[in-house]
Every structure is written in structure tokens, then in C-alpha cells.
Image (spheres, rainbow, N blue to C red):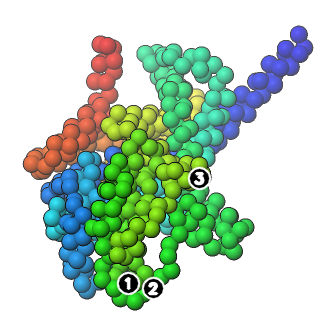
């Protein structure tokens, strides 16, 4: 009997410690994890947002080797007064983004199927959303490290959440959504946590791997390569030849593309990269997707004349190299097409709900204890509903002010201002008020965008419809509840 009581007491102590650790981690990182989860859900369909932001660009699903070769001088002619570029990238058109893009160190340009420039790539709002997810708009190295640390924190939250609720799997399908609101939030928080656990663990761990790769590479460089990071990265991404700055004609990328098509017909080129273009030391890399593989692609290397030099080995090299090349697609859901994209979006939204309800539950618990929560609750309202509202405001700012408006400063300034108002006048940031403002703003934005760009591709209209439906649910949540009751 004493042994059973002792074991029960130990289990209770473990649960209490796990619950305390879970709450502390959640409060410390909840807002940033929510921001990363929300923007990550959007980034799953990044190409669709690019088309949504610039709907009037001429599209073509094919860019031949000859057209790709012709696009380079056409783009460089547009940049005749700009500094010479050290890298040149051609993003090949795909079904998700049927637009070829030529990018230099200066700008990026859309080209048509003949290689002619048809416009500047200017989806700065989409890039801003991606930057929020990848590095929180901080300097890239420090930002990615911070996001990687938050990935570790999220994984710890998932583990402590399971440990803090011993019956969480037993009650996985028990919902009390029609009873006490506090119980409803707790049930949705716990059940969504169980249902999305494999996904959330995969996303958090791959995100941590990507974000902390700089730290790991730096440690390896310090220990084994005299702090030479290039030597560390070359073990995964391959070596670069010696640089020779002597002037030379532009690399023969058409021949390189034809070689890939002949020798590796099962692959699909996604990028053509020219390093040190128009120099004797220039070399070409073609990144090509392999069907039914998680890797982002194999990298095939060529010299300036288009002679094949070999491949890096991300498709059939060492297991570690293949694993590293598979991390990106696994994290962002870039595999298996639309079904996986929809699943990632659903799981991403669920992760947003888990994050938001976790802090809401803690705030309600404080309120029941008679502790002051009004200012913190208002600040959390600004976080949950204000962040997507600020993202929408940045989209309006970009459309009205052009692609060069300062989105980063405007977003953080608007968010900080909202938090200050929440702290100083919490009654002005009531949950219902901000939530309804977001829902109405989404409805209006979708309607205006669909009307203004009525002749855009059908994918843009579908995205507007999705925005409108989500906005309607946020604005009038009783419609969602009525539908659930009817079902």
C-alpha cells in the first residue's frame, strides 16, 4: 500500500512539475511561437501568395533552354547602370508558379516564355511574411538562430503538455464544447494538441534543425576547419571552383540545361544558378527536383562552356547529406501536392489555436484567483487578433504605396502601438471588438481584391474566397457554432 501511495505521489509530482514547466515555457515564448505558426501556415502556399500579390504578370509554364539563355542579356540590359552581379539565378516556371524569374544581386525580373522581361518581381509583402517566419525580420543569422531556439521550445511544450495530462490520449476524442467555456477551451487545447502531435513535433524539430544549423556549422568549423564555414557547408552542398575574375562571355546555360534533360530525363529543373557570371571562373549549377523524393533537388554542376562536371549527391550520396536536403520540404510541406498543402494548413491553424488557447486558459485561471489580468488579456488579444490584422494592413499598404514601402518598420510599429494601447487602455482592445475588426477587414479585403483583379488567374479568386470564408467565421463565430450543431 505504501509503495503504491509513494508511486502515486511521484507521478503527481511529475505531473505538477511538467504542468509548471509547460506554463512557464508557454508564457515565455507563446507570442513569438504564435507569430511563427501563423506565418508558417501562410508560407505553405507561398507561390499562391506571390501570384495574389502580383496578379497581372504574364504567365508561361515553359522556359526553353534557348529562352533561358536569352533572358540573361535581357535582364542585364535593364541593370546596365547597376553594380556587376556576382550571382544570377533563374527560377524555372512550375505549375504552382508559372512564372520564370531572373534574379541578380540587384533586382529580380519576370520573363516570359521567350526570355523577354515582362515586369519587376515585386511581391515584397509575400517576402515580408516569409521573413517573419524564417527569421522574424531580424538579421538572418541571429533571426534563424532565435527561430530555431523557439522550435526547441515548441518541442518542449509538446512533451511537457503530454506529461502534464496523463489521460490526454485516453480522452483524445472527448469534447465538452457545449458546456462551460473554460472547459471547452481546455478540451480544444488538449485534443488539438493530441491530434496534431506528430505534425507539430516534425515541424518543431525540423524548424529547430534549420534555424540552429548556423550554430552547428559554426561549432564544427571552430573545432575542425579553423573556423572556415565554407568547408563545413561544402560537405553538404558541394565545393566551388577557384575564382578567376578575368572577363569572359556569358556561361552556356542552354547547353547545361540540355545535358540535364538528356542525362537525367526523370528530373525537373527548378533553378539555374550562375556563379561569378561573365568571368573565366564562372560555373553553373542546375537544381532539379526528383519525383517522389523529399529532397529539394539534386545539384548538377557545369563549367562556363556548359560541360558537365558532376553532381553534389543530395539524391544518392551520404545519408546525412540526403537527410539535410530533405529537411526543407518536410518542414514547409513542399511535397505530394495539394493534399499535403491542405493538411499542413489545417495543422498549422490548429497549432495557432493551441497556442492562443494555452495562454487564454492561464489568464482565465489568474482571473478566477482574483489576480489582475485585464492588461495582459488585452495585450494577448492584440497578439492573437492584432497580428493577422497588422499583416492585412501591410498588404493594403503594399498595394496602395507600392512595393518599396517599409513593411518591416510599419508592421512592428503598428504592433507595438497596439500593445501599448492595450496596456494603457485595455477596454479599447476588447476581444470581441478586435476579432470582429479582423473578420470584417478580411471580408472587405477579399472582396476588393477579387473585384479589382477580376481577370486574374482562377487561383487568385479561390484564395480570395478562402480569405472571405475565414473572415466570416472570425467575424460571426456563431455561424460556425450553428453549423456544428446542425451537423
Q: Which residue is mark 3?
A: 318
Q: Residue at x 55, y 48 (%)?
A: 323
Question: Mark 3, residues whose alpha carbon is within 10 Å: few (<14), some, or many (≥20)?
Answer: few
Quadrant of the drawing holding the C terminus: top left
Q: Is residue 253 above or below residue 332?
A: below
Q: Which residue is mark 2?
A: 244
Residue 400 seen from this side: no
Name the residue at the right extreme: 2
Q: Which residue is mark 1?
A: 279
Image spot of residue 170 (x, y percent) = 60, 16
Q: Earlier in the sequence, mark 2 or mark 3?
A: 2
Tell me which corner region of the image, top left, top right, bottom left or bottom right, holds residue 236.
Answer: bottom right
Q: Secondary structure at mark 3?
A: loop
Q: Residue at x 64, y 35 (%)?
A: 159
Nearer-the-camera pick, 159 or 118:
118
Judge from the rendering whether residue 268 lies leftward or rightward of residue 295; answer left or right: left
Q: Residue at x 33, y 21 (%)?
A: 481
Amino acid at each position: 500500500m505504501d509503495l503504491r501511495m509513494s508511486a502515486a505521489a511521484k507521478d503527481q509530482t511529475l505531473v505538477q512539475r511538467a504542468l509548471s514547466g509547460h506554463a512557464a515555457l508557454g508564457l515565455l515564448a507563446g507570442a513569438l511561437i504564435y507569430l511563427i505558426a501563423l506565418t508558417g501556415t501562410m508560407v505553405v502556399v507561398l507561390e499562391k501568395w506571390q501570384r495574389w500579390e502580383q496578379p497581372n504578370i504574364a504567365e508561361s509554364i515553359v522556359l526553353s533552354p534557348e529562352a533561358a539563355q536569352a533572358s540573361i542579356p535581357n535582364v542585364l540590359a535593364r541593370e546596365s547602370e547597376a553594380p556587376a552581379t556576382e550571382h544570377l539565378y533563374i527560377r524555372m516556371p512550375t505549375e504552382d508558379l508559372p512564372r520564370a524569374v531572373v534574379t541578380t544581386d540587384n533586382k529580380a525580373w519576370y520573363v516570359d516564355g521567350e526570355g523577354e522581361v515582362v515586369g519587376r518581381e515585386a511581391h515584397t509583402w509575400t517576402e515580408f511574411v516569409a521573413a517573419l517566419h524564417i527569421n522574424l525580420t531580424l538579421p538572418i543569422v541571429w533571426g534563424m538562430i532565435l527561430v530555431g531556439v523557439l522550435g526547441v521550445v515548441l518541442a518542449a511544450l509538446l512533451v511537457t503538455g503530454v506529461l502534464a495530462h496523463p489521460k490526454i490520449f485516453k480522452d483524445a476524442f472527448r469534447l465538452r464544447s457545449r458546456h462551460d467555456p473554460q472547459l471547452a477551451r481546455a478540451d480544444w487545447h488538449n485534443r488539438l494538441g493530441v491530434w496534431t502531435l506528430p505534425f507539430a513535433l516534425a515541424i518543431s524539430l525540423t524548424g529547430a534543425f534549420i534555424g540552429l544549423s548556423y550554430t552547428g556549422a559554426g561549432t564544427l568549423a571552430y573545432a575542425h576547419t579553423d573556423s572556415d564555414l565554407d568547408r563545413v557547408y561544402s560537405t553538404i552542398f558541394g565545393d566551388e571552383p577557384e575564382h578567376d575574375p578575368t572577363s569572359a562571355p556569358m556561361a552556356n546555360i542552354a547547353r547545361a540545361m540540355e545535358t540535364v534533360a538528356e542525362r537525367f530525363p526523370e528530373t525537373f529543373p527548378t533553378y539555374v544558378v550562375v556563379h561569378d557570371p561573365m568571368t573565366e571562373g564562372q560555373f553553373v549549377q542546375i537544381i532539379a527536383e526528383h519525383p517522389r523524393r523529399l529532397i529539394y533537388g539534386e545539384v548538377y554542376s557545369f563549367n562556363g562552356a556548359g560541360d558537365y562536371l558532376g553532381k553534389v549527391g543530395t539524391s544518392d550520396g551520404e545519408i546525412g547529406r540526403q537527410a539535410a536536403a530533405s529537411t526543407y520540404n518536410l518542414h514547409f510541406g513542399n511535397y505530394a501536392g495539394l493534399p499535403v498543402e491542405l493538411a499542413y494548413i489545417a495543422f498549422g491553424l490548429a497549432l495557432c489555436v493551441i497556442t492562443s488557447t494555452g495562454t487564454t486558459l492561464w489568464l482565465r485561471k489568474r482571473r478566477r484567483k482574483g489576480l489582475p489580468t485585464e492588461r495582459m488579456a488585452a495585450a494577448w488579444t492584440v497578439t492573437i487578433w492584432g497580428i493577422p490584422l497588422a499583416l492585412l494592413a501591410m498588404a493594403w499598404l503594399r498595394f496602395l504605396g507600392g512595393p518599396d514601402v517599409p513593411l518591416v518598420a510599419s508592421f512592428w510599429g503598428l504592433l507595438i502601438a497596439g500593445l501599448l494601447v492595450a496596456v494603457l487602455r485595455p477596454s479599447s482592445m476588447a476581444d470581441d471588438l478586435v476579432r470582429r475588426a479582423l473578420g470584417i477587414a478580411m471580408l472587405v479585403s477579399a472582396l476588393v481584391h477579387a473585384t479589382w483583379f477580376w481577370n486574374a488567374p482562377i487561383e487568385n479568386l479561390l484564395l480570395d474566397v478562402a480569405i472571405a470564408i475565414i473572415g466570416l467565421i472570425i467575424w460571426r463565430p456563431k455561424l460556425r457554432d450553428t453549423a456544428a450543431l446542425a451537423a
